[in-house]
Image (spheres, grey):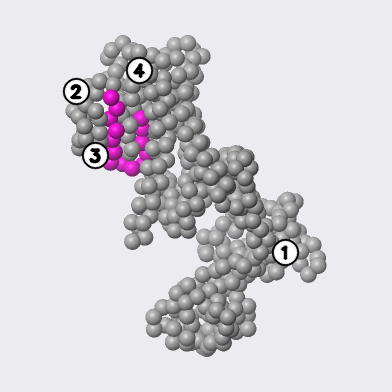
Amino acid sequence: MEFFNSLLYFIITIAILVFVHELGHFVAAKLTAMRVDAFAIGFGYRLFGYNKKLGFSFGSLPKDIDLEGNTDYRLCILPLGGYVKVAGMIDESMDKDFLQHEPQPWEFRSKSSGKKLFVLSAGVLMNILLALGIFWGINFTRPAQHLKTTTIGYVPSKSSLELASLKTNDKILSIDGNPVKYWEEVLNYIFVKKIGEEFTITIQREGKILDLQLESKLLQSDKKSGLAFLPRETKVFIADVISNSPAEKSGLMKNDTILFVNNTEIISSRQLIDIISSFPEKPIDMIVQRKNDTLKIQVTPTKDGKIGILSGIMIYAPVELEHYNFIQAGFKAFENIYENTLLFFSIIAKVITGKVEFANAFGGPIRIAKMAAQTADVNLLSFLNFLALLSLSLAIINILPFPVLDGGHILIVLLEGILKREISPKVKIIIQNIGFVILLLFMAFVIYSDIMNY
């Protein structure tokens, strides 16, 4: 069921992003009096589609069909992108039949450089506008929530936090000299801005100010191992109790909050697991809160060190709400675009220099599917925020000057403008073919990376 849920949200996500992107090219082409032969979601074999000449039909169109300037709207077999086929343009469709006749007024190749650039950049512009609109709407409808804490919770044994000499109850004052007030600022610095770097964390411990060194790569390894970096104001609750388990037999119930185990305060699911697994077949005392009652329950783990519960966490730190009016939400949305664009190029630079692993920076269909499903399970706004980030990423990637991508086409048009002559169609086709092969190999590598890391 989880697979089909992820697949569904992947298809929805890709369909929205591709439709918006290609709609930009389509509208721009129509505005500049260019014919659009096809508007396709997906690549490869045409499954079905519609055009005014034939109506709704399945399978490929007849090779000799003349759509008389009408567009064929189609769904293709590979749901990993899409394209708009503009008449008279050499693109990923590899259509070159138009080269057998002189340029026509409605063709891409007969238009001015300005109109060509408008059509080529319109997809990127639409993706940016989609991201901007989503960020704007989220900022306006949902106040920003700031967790007013920077105090560290459970520090697992042999974790990067312990190696850096951090302890439970250490209060983080600044990171690389940047003061922090909220927990999300701490996470943003550590897992985003400082990814792949070593940094200094200034803490307050028992009235003393200390500077400690942390390494982002080690924190990323902790995260992969399931070691969450949580604030002190965290509680662990029972999300579910397995039938006929020691937990059920002892009287533990779903939604119980676990306060103490063997007189140790519990502030992390990992901490809870570590303690329980240390007492196989030995009774342990648990203090739990059930609604308004505090109960003491004794439970004996199995020989595998398990009691049969699924746990979850909740953070009860004070929350500060920041509301934006419509204008402020817009400025914040532009700020979101700017910051995420800088972050994108920063991470690419760190991947190239070896500071960040490729798998930690880029995700393919599998990661996108999982994250789409996970954010959708949280709420609609979380999914939309993820969609906005993907749309912005798609815009940035597409504007890169690489063959097959919009940026590659733009570069060719600019070169033709400088040279004041058209580059040979044969050269363009060779460039497209090489770029397409490289892109396929890159996509295969990304999918392989997804599989190996998930």
Q: Residue at x 35, y 52 (%)?
A: 8
* Residue 64: numbered disc: 2
Q: Earlier in the sequence, mark 4 or mark 2?
A: 2
Q: CA distance from mark 3 to mark 2?
A: 18 Å
* Residue 431: numbered disc: none
Magenta segment includes 74: yes
Residue kind at label 4, given as amino acid type: Glu
Q: Earlier in the sequence, mark 3 or mark 2?
A: 3
Asked if disc 4 and disc 1 are in contact, CB closer than 8 Å, the reply is: no
Asked if disc 3 and disc 2 are in contact, CB closer than 8 Å, the reply is: no
Location of mark 4 (residue): 107
Q: Position of residue 285 (x, y in %)?
A: 56, 86
Location of mark 3 (residue): 47
Q: Position of residue 378 (x, y in %)?
A: 48, 58
Q: CA distance from mark 4 to mark 3?
A: 26 Å
> Label 3 crowding class (10 Å Cα cut-off): few <14, some 14-19, many 20+?
some
